Image (cartoon, helix red, strand yellow):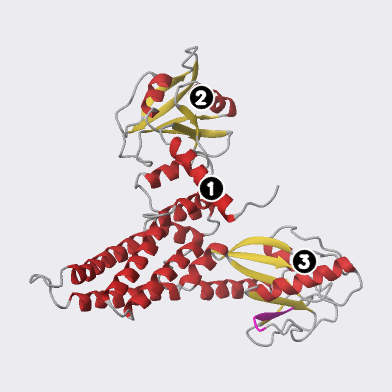
């Protein structure tokens, strides 16, 4: 299939948006709990016919926000499918802003399948697409895009630090700040527009432009401060990358397995066993770390091993930290972010487990001697990298890019020659903030944001 042109992509996106808008009147349902079998399965229903669906399956509607015992029946045969708890949330006081029903049934596969089949018989109901419940919450003003991104990060958080950061975004850390900035921008724009349109009116102060510029300078300073620390939040989402590098047979794979506490890499006495980069994701003191086991670095005529060595060098160059593992006295790596790890101190004839400098460690990957000290140092490195300062406002590239756009417009506004240009730059800054939270022109990015959501969320 030939690649789509930019015009084709825009037309395809517009077509998808029309399809989505045409289906907004549907009532959707999905399993919102974990994969069966489970003790409980939570089925959510959202849309204008959610109340009718609950009535059809259980014969009653409980008081809003009150759980009630119910027998779920097949609407055609009247056969009881299961006994459940039923909850009804009346619009707009629900997660999606629509009428929402939750059925807490037993989490067996057959029970869930039978309930889905019963719902599918009802007119106007269909299974939900991935992220469609959250998308409806956005469209009905229940969540802005920064909160939705926080929700996605919370779902996929693997460490405590990632969970804390994601929850702060879900609670509105960036969204509330951005909305406050946008309101102040609107006030500044109003001052400038008043100076342009009503300069001859007696009740319009002569210093409105000067007052607007004061607000612009304050906003620019705040947003630039947020951007100065932007990469910290993004790095916490992605995690640190620590590469284990060194010559063949130095014990790199054994060290990886020791740290990971499982046999993640093949260990062999034969040089060149590791050909490709092996990745292991770890929780190191609450911080996310990706540990890389790379091929032994040496000159070789084997084309496959040579490619592995090239990849090892490339990944080590990109890593936040390199653990250079060998049996010598000093790191052969000239990488400035390399720590020297002298391995195999358990072997006969090996020197005592002495270290030289803060970035030097003597260990035995086989017995575990000295590895705890290395892990403590790695944990401290992660803590120092992410810091214990105020939580990061910016956690995604999209957010940083739009705040960059806003800051650029504010800088141009400060230097604007003429009130018309000043007003235009303030509009550009406000537009960038509107796109950040999803207030304006975001149809082109919605599919990107929601594509990674699970069905039922």
Mark positioned earlier in the residue sequence (2 or 3): 2
Q: Mark 3 points at which residue?
A: 253
- Checking the image for residue 120, the label placed there is 2
Residue 369 shows in this picture: no
Q: Quarter of the image holding residue 327?
A: bottom right
In front: label 2 or label 1: 1
Image check: 122 left or right of 328? left
In front: label 2 or label 3: 2
Q: Mark 1 points at which residue?
A: 11
Asked whether disc 1 touches disc 3, contact meaning CB atoms under 8 Å apart, the reply is no
Q: Quarter of the image holding residue 421?
A: bottom left
Which segment did they paint magenta? Answer: 336-342
For image coordinates 63% across by 84% down, the residue present is 358
Disc 2 is placed on an element classified as: helix
Disc 1 is placed on an element classified as: helix
For image coordinates 12% across by 71% down, the residue present is 204
Q: Where is residue 28 in the image (x, y as percent from the top left)?
A: 46, 33
**Which residue of the protein is positioned furthest toward the left in this rendering?**
202
Marks 2 and 1, how far apart at CA: 32 Å
Residue 336 shows in this picture: yes
**Between residues 8 and 109, which one lies in front from this camera angle?**
8
For the stretch drawn in magenta, the main secondary structure is strand
């Amino acid at each position: 299939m030939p690649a789509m042109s930019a015009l084709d992509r825009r037309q395809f996106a517009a077509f998808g948006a029309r399809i989505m808008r045409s289906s907004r009147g549907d009532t959707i349902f999905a399993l919102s709990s974990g994969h069966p079998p489970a003790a409980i399965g939570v089925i959510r229903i959202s849309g204008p016919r959610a109340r009718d669906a609950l009535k059809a399956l259980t014969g009653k509607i409980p008081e809003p926000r009150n759980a009630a015992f119910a027998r779920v029946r097949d609407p055609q045969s009247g056969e009881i499918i299961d006994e459940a708890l039923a909850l009804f949330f009346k619009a707009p006081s629900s997660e999606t802003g629509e009428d929402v029903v939750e059925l807490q049934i037993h989490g067996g596969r057959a029970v869930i399948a039978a309930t889905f089949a019963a719902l599918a018989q009802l007119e106007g109901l269909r299974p939900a697409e991935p992220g469609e419940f959250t998308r409806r919450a956005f469209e009905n003003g229940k969540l802005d895009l920064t909160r939705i991104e926080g929700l996605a990060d919370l779902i996929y958080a693997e460490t405590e630090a990632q969970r804390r950061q994601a929850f702060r975004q879900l609670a509105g850390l960036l969204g509330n700040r951005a909305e406050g900035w946008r309101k102040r921008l609107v006030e500044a724009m109003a001052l400038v527009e008043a100076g342009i349109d009503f300069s001859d009116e007696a009740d319009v102060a002569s210093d409105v432009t000067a007052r607007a510029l004061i607000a612009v300078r304050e906003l620019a300073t705040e947003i630039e401060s947020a951007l100065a620390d932007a990469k910290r939040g993004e790095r916490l989402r992605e995690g640190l990358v620590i590469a284990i590098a060194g010559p063949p047979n130095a014990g790199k794979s054994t060290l990886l397995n020791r740290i990971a506490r499982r046999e993640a890499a093949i260990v062999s006495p034969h040089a060149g066993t590791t050909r490709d980069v092996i990745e292991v994701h770890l929780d190191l003191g609450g911080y996310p770390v990706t540990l890389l086991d790379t091929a032994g670095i040496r000159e070789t005529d084997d084309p496959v091993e040579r490619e592995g060595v090239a990849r090892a060098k490339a990944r080590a160059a990109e890593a936040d930290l390199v653990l250079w593992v060998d049996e010598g006295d000093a790191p052969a790596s000239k990488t400035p972010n390399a720590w020297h790890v002298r391995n195999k101190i358990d072997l006969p004839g090996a020197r005592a487990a002495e270290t030289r400098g803060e970035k030097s460690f003597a260990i035995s990957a086989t017995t575990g001697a000295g590895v705890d000290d290395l892990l403590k140092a790695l944990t401290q490195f992660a803590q120092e990298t992410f810091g214990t300062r105020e939580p990061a406002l910016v956690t995604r590239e999209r957010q940083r890019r739009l705040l960059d756009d806003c800051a650029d417009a504010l800088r141009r506004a400060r230097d604007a020659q003429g009130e018309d240009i000043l007003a235009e730059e303030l509009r550009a800054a406000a537009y960038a903030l509107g796109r950040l939270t999803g207030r304006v022109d975001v149809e082109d990015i919605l599919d990107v944001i929601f594509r990674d959501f699970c069905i039922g969320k």
